[in-house]
Amino acid sequence: MDKNVSGDQISNDSRFPEVHNIARFTPESYQHKIFIDHVIISIQSLFRNYLKSKTLIEASLLNITKSKCENTKCLNERNCTQWNSSGAYFGTELDITEVTPNLYLGSIHDAENIKLLREKNINFVVQLLENENECARLPLITYYFIEIKDNGSENLLEKLKGALDFIDESHKARGNVLVHCRAGLSRSPSIIIAYMIIKFGYNEYTALKALRRMRPGVNPNNGFKKQLKKFRKANNLPF
């Protein structure tokens, strides 16, 4: 290229179509462009490093949280996010569930919440726990304790009659009843399902489906489900 050719001549010269309609560059403007390009590249590099660091930090936090949940026996479901043995998910504790106007289903936290029990006028409580000391007992409440694990090999059938009789007697006394276990997802729902089979003529499947609409996550273990089927047949109720 002729060193004496000016920028205006280049932009108007048909030999250089690629520079038509492009603003004329001076040495100063060219240096300015190089500087801006350098700044943009630096910013992009910083942003990529930020994203990489952010991803590594989030992955580390996830591993720490997962490790804590897997290696620590969680006695308080309110603060834990995992799957229980029956396959039901819990992380945020469910609110107490009103099954009928005088029958409630809930967790151990509901049973220990005296303000909640007073609001619901609950003065009778059925407890399904591994031992009687798991849950604090409150004054002016009548308790019926059932020692049972959330395990399919447990004999649920032999415990149903006593629980259902207690609920009936409580209702005759015009009392409201709370049935609870630890999370309110397997053991205590099994009692509620048996109650629905007897009182409403449901089979075990429709009772479970109806209860899940009221309390998502309800899922008695497979052993309890089989025993509820036997319970329905033993009471000569249709499928």
Image (spheres, rainbow, N blue to C red):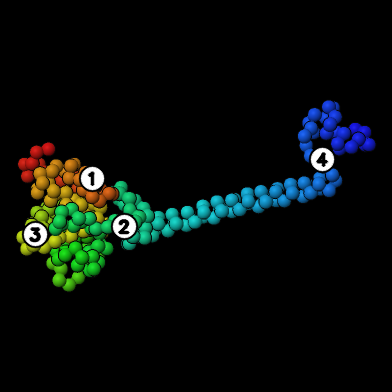
| Identity, as a three-letter code, of the amino acid under mark 1 | Asn
Asked if residue 41 shows in the view, the reply is yes
Q: Residue at x 81, y 45 (%)?
A: 30
Q: Earlier in the sequence, mark 2 or mark 4?
A: 4
Check disc 4: other Cα within 10 Å, few if <14, some if 14-19, many if 20+.
few
The picture places residue 200, in percent across and down from the top left corner, at 10, 46
What residue did someone put label 1 on? 222
Q: Earlier in the sequence, mark 3 or mark 1?
A: 3
**Total numbered circles:** 4
Alpha-carbon span between mark 3 and mark 1: 30 Å
Q: Nearer the viewer, residue 76 or 211?
A: 211
Question: Looking at the image, is mark 3 or mark 1 nearer the viewer?
Answer: 3
What residue did someone put label 3 on? 171
What residue did someone put label 4 on? 24
Asked if residue 148 shows in the view, the reply is no
Q: Residue at x 77, y 46 (%)?
A: 33
| Identity, as a three-letter code, of the amino acid under mark 2 | Glu
Position of 201 relative to 167 (above/below)? above
What residue did someone put label 2 on? 93
Alpha-carbon span between mark 4 and mark 3: 93 Å
Q: Earlier in the sequence, mark 4 or mark 1?
A: 4
Please say if the residues under marks 4 and 3 sit with CB atoms less than 8 Å apart. Answer: no
Q: Residue at x 22, y 68 (%)?
A: 114
The picture places residue 184, in percent across and down from the top left corner, at 24, 55
Please say if the residues under marks 4 and 1 sit with CB atoms less than 8 Å apart. Answer: no
Question: Looking at the image, is mark 2 or mark 4 nearer the viewer?
Answer: 4
